[in-house]
Amino acid sequence: MFPSDAWLTCLALSINLSEYQRLRRDPSQRFDDLVRRHSGLWDRYAGAERVERLSGSRPQDDWIRCAAGPGWALVGDSGLHQDPWSGAGMDCAGVSAALLVESYCAAGGTDTWIHAYEQRRDEQMLDVFHDTVSGAADLSTAPP
């Protein structure tokens, strides 16, 4: 659950691909069944009014791209995209932006920032990326 605009709250579930296929057949009922498993959440959800239709997407593809080149750089999901189930993408976006600024400023006007940024991004983010990717294969094994 996370706050949205107009005093609304967004509720998101991460599920295995097999569960996603069942959810697509009867979205409202299956979504309610899944939320019901979370007792503390269910009480709040059951008393709330749904104001939008349910929406979802299949598990996301993952990728790692070259972080930068002369005159350009990628931060966040544009350079290192991982399935959103873990929430690590938001952290990746902020950290990679900070690493880019630090690398660029430290380069003193030279193109050495390109290699420095990619190296620092990979050192700080690839372990989390690989953990997220491997966990996405079967969310039933993910830590609570």
Image (spheres, rainbow, N blue to C red):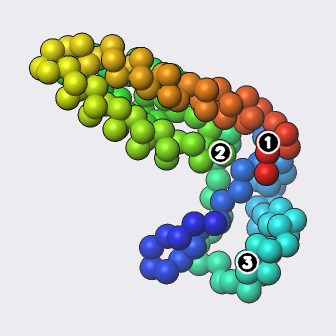
Contact, mark 1 vs mark 2 (Cβ under 8 Å): yes
Give the residue at mark 1: 142
Residue 3, image x and y in percent? 53, 70
Q: Is residue 60 left or right of residue 40?
A: left
Question: Going from the N terminus, do you reach mark 1 or mark 2 first?
Answer: 2
In this rendered view, identify the residue nearer to me: 6 or 51: 6
Real-space CA distance between mark 1 and mark 3, rounded to the nearest whole angstrom? 24 Å
Q: Residue at x 34, y 38 (%)?
A: 98
Residue 60, image x and y in percent? 62, 37
Bin the neighbour count of mark 3 within 10 Å (Cα to Cα): few under 14, some 14-19, many 20 and up: some
Please tell me whether residue 10 is drawn above or below residue 70 in the rendered image: below
Real-space CA distance between mark 1 and mark 2, rounded to the nearest whole angstrom? 9 Å
Q: Residue at x 66, y 83 (%)?
A: 49
Q: Secondary structure at mark 1?
A: loop
Give the residue at mark 2: 86
Residue 58, image x and y in percent? 68, 42
In this rendered view, identify the residue nearer to me: 18 or 79: 79
User: Amino acid type of disc 3?
Assistant: Tyr
Q: Residue at x 71, y 56 (%)?
A: 13
Residue 80, image x and y in percent? 49, 29
Marks 2 and 3: which is nearer the front? Answer: 2
Q: Quadrant of the N terminus?
A: bottom right
